[in-house]
Amino acid sequence: MKVDVLLGLQWGDEGKGKIVDFLAPKYNVVARFQGGPNAGHTLEFDGHKHVLHQIPSGIFRKNICNVVGNGVVLDPIIFKEEIDKLSPFQVDVSKNLFVSKKAQLILPTHRLLDAADEQAKGAKKIGSTLKGIGPTYRDKTSRNGLRVGDILSPNFKEKYDALVSRHKVQLSAYDFEYDLQSMEEEWFGAIEFMKALTLVESEHYINQQISSSSSILAEGAQGSLLDIDFGSYPFVTSSTTMAAGVCTGLGVAPSSIGEVFGIFKAYCTRVGSGPFPTELHDEVGEELRREGKEFGATTGRPRRCGWLDLPALRYAIMLNGVTQLFMMKADVLNIFKEIQICTEYKLEDGSVTRDFPYEANEGTVEPIYRAMKGWDCSLESVEDLESIPEALKEYVAFIEKEVGVPINIVSVGPDRLQTLVKGELIA
Ligand code: GDP
Ligand code: IMO
Ligand code: MG
């Protein structure tokens, strides 16, 4: 069978964790293909809230294999903590969690380098999650990184020391103080723990599953507008967050990609620095943050909030070849009598575009909004898409018409059960 892909179409935090958990029973395998502990994917069910960073969001479903693919950068300390937190929930990671030997390891010094880089950038900082993501991918592409499979090598410590020596030289260029020793003790403890996990050549595993007609869902992290190539560079993450990243991050041929589920919030958020054309700096922005509880799942930082941005959404749909859209957090807009939606941008030269331009900074693009009637009521008792308020139906239909892709899920709350599905959802 083909590999379906679920990914975020905005700046991350669209609700990927919730929907992967919701869809997981339809699949045999759920696999992460990029990113690392910069991700924070929230799942809510049975009165519990779980935040996963590196573990795929199929982990709570029985009989599903969860794979951490080669494209991921893995922090052993955070991984161990995440696995420890699963123990009260009858999750047996010895059976349902596989880790690629080719995934790159995040070292304590990668985290230090991330922090030192950001400190040196001052006001121009990216607003990184400080998890060491950029420095780890940098070592991967400069061919200096350590991989999960290396932990089984008899000369692992030697390899580690060689890389850390390079990092110490790099750190000496910064005015940055650090204490590595305590971080290293914890890290090596977590490495020992990892040796007992199922470490695999995941590209072989995934391709065997494809051949034996197993169904696979690839779970994206971050969002399309944080992609290293197509995001608002340099205010991006360091991986390919797009559907294309599934091929390199899992070892899957392009012809094996099936459905591409694009997930977006009914409005926009962003955490960290960088352009955000529809950002609201007023009371409405505050209301969105309050209603949507828009605080980072990984860092706790307040998320910047604004109206839905259709030029940005069209761009992400185009780049990913999205076949179905899922709209999240519709309930957050319940309080508004009127909702704005950005349909086009006015550029500096006065021209108007429906496309996402090279620069989308404040001053270079001015969003053109269309006002839509709000539904102005609770969605709590709504059980299916047919019975959503007329104004929400119009909001959904307008977006579908503007972007040319059907919206097959509307999410109306954080819980697994608060998910409204159109009849024809293919998965
Ligand atoms: P992810 O990184 O894409 O998995 O998203 P996050 O977990 O970082 O952020 C999404 C947040 O919105 C989480 O707190 C979810 O519990 C919550 N959430 C998801 N879907 C909905 C929804 O439809 N309505 C509301 N109110 N919250 C939602
Ligand atoms: P999920 O998977 C939202 C942002 C950071 C920063 C930029 C670079 O939960 O949607 P990095 O640490 O990757 O070098 O930071 O990317 N960022 C995210 N924003 N959700 C995420 O993941 C993010 N992962 C990274 O805030 O602006
Ligand atoms: Mg998140």
Image (cartoon, rainbow, N blue to C red):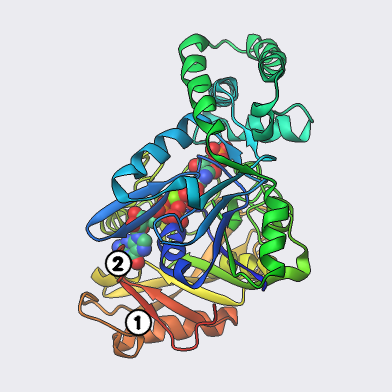
Residue at 60% x, 82% y is 404
Give whichever of discs 2 and 1 has the lower sequence position: 1
Quick check: can you spot residue 48? Answer: yes
Image-quadrant location for residue 208:
bottom right
Q: Amino acid at mark 1?
A: Leu
| Total numbered labels | 2
Residue 10 to residue 380: above or below: above
Image location (x, y in percent) of residue 190: 49, 26
Determine which residue is flagged by label 2: 413
Q: Is residue 6 above or below residue 143?
A: below
- Neighbour tally class for label 1: few under 14, some 14-19, many 20 plus, Cα within 10 Å: many
The percent position of residue 267, horizontal first and vertical second, equals 42, 65
Q: Which residue is mark 1?
A: 392
In the drawing, what numbered circle is on residue 404?
Answer: none
In which quadrant of the rendered view does residue 388 lie? bottom left
Q: Is residue 147 left or right of residue 266?
A: right
